Image (tube, grey):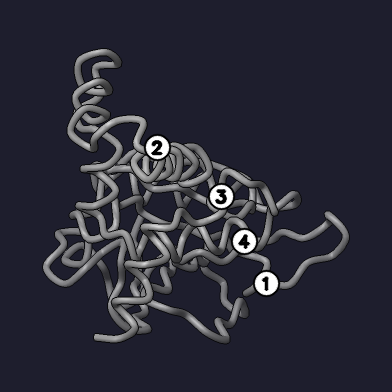
Amino acid sequence: MTYQIVSHGESRSFPHGDPFLDGASERGEVILHCGAPRGVSAATDAAAVLIELGNECLGVHTGEDAGREGSHVLGFARYRNGDDPPSPLVELVTQPASDPAAIAAACAVFESAGLEVSVCADQAGRIIDRLVRPKYNAALRFLDEGLASAEAMDLTCRLGLSYPDGPVERVERGGLAHHYAVTRALFEVTGAPGYAPARRAAVAAQRKERE
């Protein structure tokens, strides 16, 4: 399955030098719009059109129709923890009436490049951020409340839960300002208290604005 990449700026999923970029063709059966796409045209005979997503939903690009939306246009985001290198996981975003052939074509493109694909519905935060961001917020709040030191919480998660790293060290490595942006977007959509940005993340975002 061949693929074509249309660049709209720096891509978080496939930054400069990523091997996936080298496999692209001038014309492909699947078209990927990477970076920060705006005004993407779906008028093409490609098997699938893929739009790289940030914190927004696919519906922002395609529009919605009372739960009947969907076509050969899909969304995607390769998970990365803030400024860390991208992970091997791609979250493929679908809508209620998405074309099964387009989903299969998109999966084939990513999997042929050695990436893993998780198919998910068009919800803010997709799978991973909806799962992990409340945990990071909780750890940051526990730190503010004096429940335990950052080192103690990280050690507890590594030894007690067999995590490769602890929540505080992980969210700080990825960038607290980035965490603030993600959790703020989730909180605005869901209103769930667990997504309300922690104080330390808000402070980091404010400091970044001043720089």
- The residue at the point 36 percent across, 57 percent down is 200
Q: In front of the other: label 3 or label 4?
A: 3
User: Are the residues at dot 4 and dot 1 in contact (C-beta closer than 8 Å)?
Assistant: no
Q: Between marks 3 and 4, how big is the CA–CA gap?
A: 31 Å
- The residue at the point 59 percent across, 48 percent down is 101
**Secondary structure under badge 1?**
helix
Q: Between marks 4 and 2, how big is the CA–CA gap?
A: 44 Å
Residue 159, above or below 154: above
Q: Amino acid at mark 1?
A: Thr
98 relative to 84 in the view: left or right: right
Q: Within 10 angstroms of label 2, few (less than 14), some, or many (20 or more) residues?
A: some
Q: Position of residue 48 (x, y in %)?
A: 53, 61
Q: Which quadrant of the figure has residue 161?
A: top left
113 relative to 140 in the view: left or right: left
**Secondary structure under badge 2?**
helix
User: Are the residues at dot 3 and dot 4 in contact (C-beta closer than 8 Å)?
Assistant: no
Q: Between marks 1 and 2, how big is the CA–CA gap?
A: 40 Å
Q: Which residue is mark 4?
A: 72
Q: Amino acid at mark 3?
A: Tyr
Q: Within 10 angstroms of label 4, few (less than 14), some, or many (20 or more) residues?
A: many
Q: Which residue is mark 2?
A: 142
Q: Which quadrant of the figure has residue 188?
A: bottom right
Q: Position of residue 204 (x, y in %)?
A: 32, 67
Q: Amino acid at mark 2?
A: Phe
User: Are the residues at dot 4 and dot 2 in contact (C-beta closer than 8 Å)?
Assistant: no
Of the pair 180 and 81, the residue shown nearer to us? 180
Of the pair 72 and 172, the residue shown nearer to us? 172
Q: Which residue is mark 1?
A: 62
Q: Which residue is mark 3?
A: 195
Residue 145's mark?
none
**Secondary structure under badge 4?**
loop
Q: Between marks 1 and 3, how big is the CA–CA gap?
A: 26 Å
